[in-house]
Image (cartoon, rainbow, N blue to C red):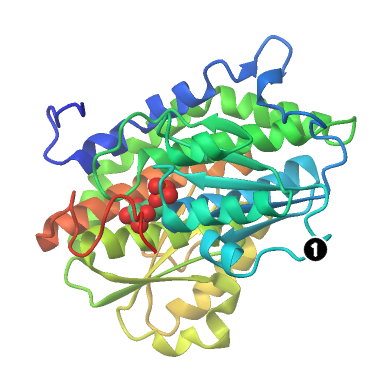
Amino acid sequence: AAAGKGEFAHFMLKEIHEAPRAVARTLEGHVDWSRGRVAEGLLLPGGQRRGLRRLWLAGMGTAYHACLLGAWWVEQIAGIPARAVLASDFRDDPPREGEGERGLLVAVSQSGETADTLEAARAAQARGIPVYALCNVPGSTLARLADRVLMTRAGTEVAVAATKSYVAQMVGLLLLALALAEGEEGRVRRSQVLDGLASSVEAVSRSLALEPAMADLSRRLVRERAVYLVGRGPDHAATLEAALKLKEVAYLHAEAMAAAELKHGSLALIEEGTALLALSGRAHLAARLASNLREAASRGADVFVWTHLDGAPFQAARRTYRLPDPGHELLAPLVQAPPLQLLAYYVGLGRGTEIDRPRNLAKSVTVE
Ligand code: G6P
């Protein structure tokens, strides 16, 4: 049975605050800290990781956004070509004969019951592509159907909008990327990522300290008709998820776009006072992002930035929200998520929406 809301006004707020615990529990037993590597049990059955040629990562909604980050991590950490794909697209256009050879489908789903994700898994298996599932509900259809399961241990999530389960999915995908990596190449970096993961519970917990600042910013956004969110690469993936939260729980039109794409069209939407939210998680791209933001600000955009970077060059921003050090740059999405979830929560509160049960939505979509 689901626990109550306790001291919290909504399940969503309670569950955002449970993110640190979700991280800790998902890491539990999956890392051999003394030897500085991911536990053996995480590896793939049979041929293990050796010879794996390509990965697809598939999910819907929030899980799809986790897949976008997961594909980036698999390529960065394990050096295996990986592509995030909507589970619906994978099942509509599955790999052709031979294309799936030595491939793996990573199916990500909180509930393990999403129809499109289950169909993607079945389509993969029908083509001889093994399925590695990441899910949060033990005994779910996906968990039973998959060739290998990595349980995210976020605990029961009651609010329709995914929060702590997304953070747990990110941790699970990082563990998988580490498990897939082998050989000397990139070993130093892998141990740095692992060191970062060792402090991620604390980092995620510290990110929640932005709650009063997010409540404050929510008052600035509460009467907006639209907000835009930008980032580069993985930061863009993180803004897609932040935009989804604002749509789901605040009924606010929020559009995420790649920062570099602004000048290729969307800049025409910017007027005096348009709210533009930006994420900056990578030091070597900060200057490029800053130039994208300057262009928008000079057309009237009110720019707000979230970053853990020291001395980032965001003079164009009206406000910069300082995120805690994620321990490693690849882990920046872990500390970006909770504050933006809090922002969506408070904008929803201000707009008087049904936060835990938004109109027209279901926690898990089991029909096509
Ligand atoms: C529904 C929920 C979303 C969720 C998506 C995928 O649309 O409202 O919050 O991200 O399904 O759900 P899953 O259980 O497969 O992660």
Crowding around mark 1 (Cα neighbors within 10 Å: few <14, some 14 to 19, many 20+) is: few
Is residue 39 toward the left or the right of residue 222 in the image? right
Image quarter in which the C terminus is found: bottom left
Q: Position of residue 187 (x, y in %)?
A: 82, 30
Residue at image mark 1? 97
- Residue that appears at 39% across and 42% down: 111
Can residue 309 be spotted in the picture? no
Vertical placement of residue 171 versus 336, above or below: above
Instruction: Pinpoint residue 90: horizontal percent, then vertical percent.
Output: 60, 63
Residue 280 appears left or right of 345:
right
Q: Can you see residue 338?
A: yes
SS for callout 1: loop
Q: Taking 172 as reference, is 27 above or below it?
A: above
- Please indicate whether residue 250 sits to the left or right of residue 307 in the image: left
Disc 1 residue type (three-letter): Glu
**What's the residue at 30%, 37% (across, down)?**
157
Asked where in the image residue 284 lies, by quadrant, the reply is bottom right
Horizontal side of residue 317 vs 70, given as left or right: left
Q: Where residue 57 sits in the image (x, y, percent)? A: 62, 52
Q: How many labels sit on residues?
A: 1
For the point 78% across and 53% down, the residue is 81
Q: Of residues 321 and 368, which is closer to you in this image?
A: 368
Q: 184 or 343, which is in the foreground?
A: 184
Q: Residue lying at the far front in this picture: please name it.
A: 126
Q: In the picture, which quadrant includes the N terminus?
A: top left
